[in-house]
Amino acid sequence: MQHFQVLSTLLMYPDEPLIAALDELYAVLDARPELKATLQPLFAYLAGEDLLTLQENYVSTFDRNPSHSLHLFEHIHGESRDRGQAMVDLMQEYGKHGLQMCADDLPDYVPLFLEFLSQVDSDEADRLLSDAVHVLAHLGRKLAGNNSPYAVVFTAIEALSPVPAEELTEPPIRDMDELLETMGPGADGVEPLLNKGLSCGSSGVQPINFHPRQRPQAAPA
């Protein structure tokens, strides 16, 4: 499952260690020649530009353009309360497999999600990727439409999925008040993400809401 680690690394902010590791990352893909061919343009881009240009382009692509956000649930839940619950569900999935987040990133950060896929068995990876591929492919299409060299990462992810990606049809609902209500502290001052009984010993398949919930149609006037 090292190919998921390579994909994760390629989506990280480009720094000197990442650039120095390009040859090693490329060699890891010898066992997956089809992925290697798909990703070759990104490797060439990363190896061919100066570091400052790479970093400026990365920031303008992912940090300054919300439509290219590397946070999965941003594209399907926006800032609605559904996003908060989806975060909780994904953290529980990580905890079930013994993954403890130690960085400041949210659990739906794409490089973190891909790293997680590299740590679980192939059946689990297939199950989770089958759920997430629709939004990942959506992000890939956005990047491709802007001629981003990073689009090929999502082409590779889509090729790894056991199921074809479907179009996302419902735009995200953006309501910061709802997000704060869900993700912020409760009346007792406890953060909900820390008050959900997260445990590495939890069992069972945790459903993750990778799709926007259907909203009831308004009654005709």
Image (spheres, rainbow, N blue to C red):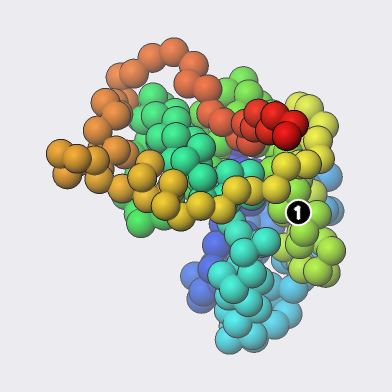
Q: Position of residue 164 (x, y in %)?
A: 82, 32
Q: Please identify the residue farthest to the top as the structure is shown.
A: 204
Q: Which residue is mark 1?
A: 140
| Left or right of 163 on screen, residue 96 | left
Is any atom of residue 129 visible in this view? no
Image height of 64 relative to 2, above or below: below
Q: Position of residue 2 (x, y in %)?
A: 59, 42
Is any atom of residue 198 visible in this view? yes
- Residue at x 64% of width, y 48% of height: 172
Q: Position of residue 141 (x, y in %)?
A: 80, 54
- Residue at x 73% of width, y 34% of height: 221
Mark 1 nearby-residue class (10 Å; few <14, some 14–19, many ≥20): many
Numbered disc 1: secondary structure = helix
Q: Tell which of 128 and 19 is nearer to you.
A: 128
Q: To which quarter of the image does residue 212 belong?
A: top right
Image height of 26 relative to 183, above or below: below
- Residue at x 56% of width, y 36% of height: 117
Q: To which quarter of the image does residue 220 belong?
A: top right
Image height of 16 relative to 126, above or below: below
- Residue at x 71% of width, y 38% of height: 133
Q: Position of residue 12 (x, y in %)?
A: 55, 62
Q: Tell which of 152 and 35 is nearer to you.
A: 152
